[in-house]
């Protein structure tokens, strides 16, 4: 856990480190920081990763199969992995999905080069957005604040926070400027720039759907679709992706489109699909979930809602069925 505030122990537990928190503008005494018999104010002393919810950008680096070490997509080992055909050896996927990937990848080193280019563009896009907001604040970097909003899950399996990131409105003295800058999260800005694909995973659906994701009424197909169609925020996010596609921005650049989706690269590396089901948001009124292996039959990422398999019984109880 060197230089990180949260992480995983060797046995897989999510763990963290903290130091005494502030009391006013200074670190408080223990008496000041202890609120009651089960509450104390602490703060995180080290770095912490924040994984953006709702979006998925190309991977700058990721482990090659059989290793836990991250390898840059620019590394020739990734190009050789695809060009040699090693990517498909012992890959535990249904036959029809494997054939679909073979047709797209074509044992080409360009898959890795292409992914690396788009990953770097996404990285620069986020850096530029953050830098622009910071410069408009006229604050020193150590005083610049970021606002985080969270959905159902707070941490991912590696100890990173899961959330939506905004510039904090208190950075800006001009209220109108603050409202304009903070109107969209950086998550949504990356979608609009075309440098990330949407990645909607239930139940982490806020702020696109502001509802209790476990309420039986909200899971019933009829009400589910009313909520989806009535959500202005979800419509806006999906339309921003469609606009980026139409304009040929980022991953949709007609001269250099992204060839392999980020989650595809990850499951190829891990040699298996994640345990999820799918709802096709382009088919309102349906009451079925699809096995994840059929994701490519929903061609546009903004039309996919991923549902972890653990929640299948909840959906089936509410009236959904799984269609093979």
Image (tube, rainbow, N blue to C red):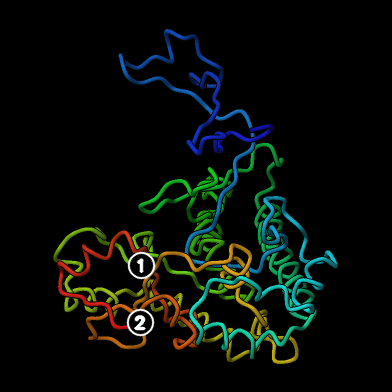
Q: Which mark is residue 307?
A: 1
User: Closer to the N terminus: mark 2 or mark 1?
Assistant: 2
Q: Residue furthest front?
A: 90
Image quadrant in which the C terminus is located: bottom left
Q: Quadrant of residue 141?
A: top right
- Which residue does the image show at 24% across and 79% down from the upper left? 225
Rate crowding at label 2 as few (under 14), some (14 to 19) or many (20 or more) other CA atoms within 10 Å: some
Give the tally of numbered discs. Answer: 2
**Image location of residue 253, percent across then percent down:** 69, 87
Q: Is residue 232 above or below residue 5?
A: below
Q: Provide residue 124's location: percent of width, then percent of height.
A: 74, 64
Asked which secondary structure carries label 1, the reply is strand
Q: Say left or right for 65 vs 324.
A: right
Relative horizontal placement of residue 203, taking residue 125 as reference (left or right): left
Task: Tell me residue 59's x, y (percent).
Answer: 67, 64
Residue nearest the observer in this picture, 284 or 148: 284
């Amino acid at each position: 856990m060197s230089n990180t505030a949260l992480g995983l122990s060797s046995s897989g537990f999510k763990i963290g480190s903290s130091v005494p928190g502030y009391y006013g503008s200074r670190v408080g005494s223990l008496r000041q920081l202890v609120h009651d018999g089960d509450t104390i104010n602490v703060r995180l002393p080290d770095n912490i990763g924040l994984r953006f919810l709702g979006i998925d950008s190309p991977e700058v680096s990721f482990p090659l199969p059989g290793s836990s070490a991250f390898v840059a997509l620019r590394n020739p080992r990734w190009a050789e992995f695809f060009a040699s055909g090693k990517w498909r050896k012992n890959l535990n996927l249904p036959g029809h999905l494997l054939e679909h990937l073979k047709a797209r990848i074509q044992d080409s080193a360009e898959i890795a080069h292409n992914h690396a280019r788009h990953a770097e563009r996404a990285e620069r896009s986020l850096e530029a957005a953050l830098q622009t907001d910071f410069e408009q604040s006229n604050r020193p970097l150590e005083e610049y604040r970021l606002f985080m909003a969270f959905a159902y899950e707070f941490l991912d399996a590696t100890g990173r926070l899961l959330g939506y990131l905004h510039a904090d409105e208190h950075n800006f003295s001009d209220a109108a400027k603050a409202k304009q800058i903070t109107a969209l999260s950086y998550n949504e800005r990356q979608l609009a720039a075309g440098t990330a694909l949407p990645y909607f995973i239930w139940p982490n659906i806020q702020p696109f759907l502001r509802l209790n994701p476990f309420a039986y009424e909200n899971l019933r197909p009829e009400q589910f679709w009313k909520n989806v169609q009535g959500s202005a925020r979800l419509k806006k996010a999906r339309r921003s992706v469609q606009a980026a596609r139409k304009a040929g921005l980022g991953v949709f650049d007609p001269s250099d489109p992204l060839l392999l989706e980020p989650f595809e690269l990850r499951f190829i590396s891990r040699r298996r699909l994640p345990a999820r089901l799918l709802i096709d948001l382009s088919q309102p009124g349906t009451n079925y979930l699809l096995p994840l292996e059929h994701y490519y039959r929903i061609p546009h990422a903004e039309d996919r809602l991923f549902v972890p398999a653990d929640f299948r019984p909840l959906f089936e109880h509410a009236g959904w069925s799984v269609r093979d």
